Image (cartoon, coloured by chain):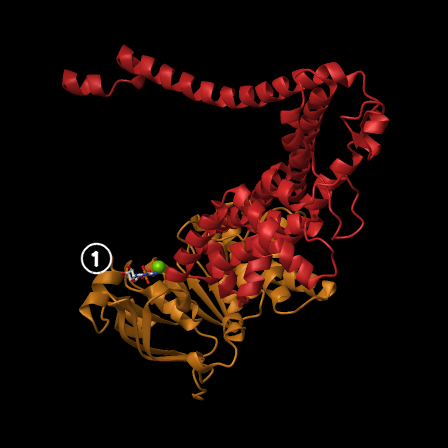
Chain colours: A red, B orange
Amino acid sequence: MSPAAFASSRPRRHRPAYQRVIERLVEGVIRACGASAILFVFGIFFFVFREAAPLLGKLDWHQVLFSQEWYPTSRANVRYGVGALIVGTLSVTGLSMLLAVPFGVGAAVFVSEFCTGRVKETLKVLIELLAAIPSIVWGFIGLSVMNQVIQALFPAPVGLNLLNAAILLALMSVPIMVSIGEDALKAVPDSYREAALALGVTRWQLVYRVLLPAARNGLLAAVLLGVGRAIGETMAVLMATGHAVNIPHSLFDPIRTLTATIAAELGETSVGSDHYRMLFVIGVMLFTITFIVNLLADLAVRGVRKR
Amino acid sequence: MVTSPPKIEVRDLRLAYGHKEVLHGVSFAVPSHEIFGIIGPAQSAKTSLLRCLNRTIEFTPHIHVSGSIRVDGQDVRRVPDVYELRRKIGMVAPLPVGLPLSIYDNVAFAPRCAGLTNRQELEARVEKCLRQAALWDEVKDRLDTLGTKLSGGQQQRLTIARALSHEPEILCLDEFSIAIDPVTTMRIEDVLKELRREITIILVTNLTQQARRLADRTMFLWNGEVVELDRTEVMFSDSPKDRRTYDYVQGNFG
Ligand SMILES: Nc1ncnc2c1ncn2[C@@H]1O[C@H](COP(=O)(O)OP(=O)(O)O)[C@@H](O)[C@H]1O
Ligand SMILES: [Mg+2]
């Protein structure tokens, strides 16, 4: 064996120094990227929490959580009851998901499994376009179009209410669900489809017995992103809910959400005042709600996986 | 000899993917309870031929099929219910595809989809098929673990059990031993010898000796054409009709 051949067959550990340095560097950068994601989340939470903290000890929590008296600017009788706001956020999000999940998952299945070629491409482009509509535009649609549609179709005196906002939120989250859900279904290997169809099952049976279970994690992620968008949405709900502090008793009652409250009032408070801090407390609550939703979803995925 | 109508009869079958014709007029007939071997090098359209039988070829876009395929005397393209046709034909793919379900659910999948809901009947069916596939003893205590957790050979037997689960009259195996060890292969071959009493078997194989061991008659398919079709002893004798058959089965090419 010639010396040159011998050298090239040596173990790779003896590579030139600069290669090792580059490798270390790349590794470091990747690590930093990963760490920064965690850092940002904690950073955001920290700064929101810091603004809210001085008020936390002074609050009557029973009143905050269960009272619907939100009088932050009253002189004689200040009340920070966010009960109605929490109910508002949860009800509008829940209702919108009730509308959006079947629709979104159904559309994802349709695009992924029942469309081919040009139809599929066109639909995907349209859905991406829908996802790109800014929320203020949805707000306008709620204010002008949906408002009148609801007044015309239902015996409701005003069209700015729970139903209006829920429909808007559903329309906003469906495109996200469809595009992520379609990716999840596309990731299911074709061999599953072939194998199942060769067993003499119909396409519907294939969808609900094989594809939906196989893609469930991705589909759940799709639904969660939709939920996230719905909970966090501010502008459209501010315009379409009627923005009245109120626990809804029907679909046609106006409501107010946590997010819209922050958006509408933060500009008018003086920095450091109790009202100002209270809005940050609401921010912490929003954080907590999304955290719980994510946690529940995570547990659900694990539970399903264990079976 | 009584001439009953053939179980499968293929006449002048042509198949093209787009403009590329891969089956150039293939004809053969398989009587009931025969093990029919199909040998041939890769790319000779053996898999495509099987996919024509149960019409799963239709899921590939831009295909053209001509000629006729009859199963029990009925043209597969005119069957009233294609799902029934597919249930009549069990398919085993070269690489085992465990559906992402438990062992039990993998086998119960097709019967359930066909409308069998009675628990006892389902359990009996699953046990019967797993026994037929010589897998029951190895998995009977862990029927609810994922099918994909099994070893390669076990997974292949699971797909055989699954292919039997809808009680087919024909079983097609497509190079089933490509990814499994010789011992498991021999076990499955024994299973096939048992099964032929009940059903008709089409055995596509890349191992010519496997066809020699199992098949009653063997067809040599080459580049989408039938080179020779005869009793297996003749195909593997020193004097098959076609020189290419001799070369192929002797391992001189392919
Ligand atoms: N889905 C497909 N689309 C286009 N061509 C295909 C497809 N499947 C197989 N072919 C072509 O058909 C020919 C036969 O393939 P195949 O039936 O898989 O042969 P074999 O199973 O004998 O190896 C090959 O040339 C292959 O490229
Ligand atoms: Mg093949």
Residue B201 appears left or right of B16: right
Q: Can residue A186 be seen in this view?
A: no
Instruction: Give the residue furthest to the top.
Output: A17
Q: Is residue B109 above or below residue A294?
A: below
Where residue B251 appears, x then y in whole percent?
24, 57
Q: What residue type is labelled 1?
A: Phe
Instruction: Give the residue furthest to the bottom.
Output: B2
Q: Quadrant of residue A265?
A: top right
Using the image as rendered, state which of residue B214 and residue B103 is in the foreground: B103
Q: In this view, does B244 lie above or below A167?
A: below
Instruction: Give the residue furthest to the front.
Output: A75
In the structure shown, which secondary structural element does the residue marked by tag 1 occupy?
loop
Using the image as rendered, state which of residue B32 and residue A59 is in the foreground: A59
Residue located 59% across and 52% down the image: A144
Where residue A80 appears, x then y in whole percent?
79, 27
Instruction: Give the residue furthest to the left.
Output: A2
Using the image as rendered, state which of residue B217 and residue B155 is in the foreground: B155
Residue A24 appears left or right of B92: left
Q: How crowded is mark 1: few (under 14 residues within 10 Å), some or many (20 or more)?
A: few
Q: Can residue B248 be seen in this view?
A: yes
Residue B42 appears left or right of A215: left
Residue located 31% across and 75% down the image: B230
- The residue under label 1 is B253
- Pointer 1 indicates a residue of which chain? B
Residue located 73% across and 43% down the image: A255
Quarter of the image with the N terminus of chain A is top left
Quarter of the image with the C terminus of chain A is top right
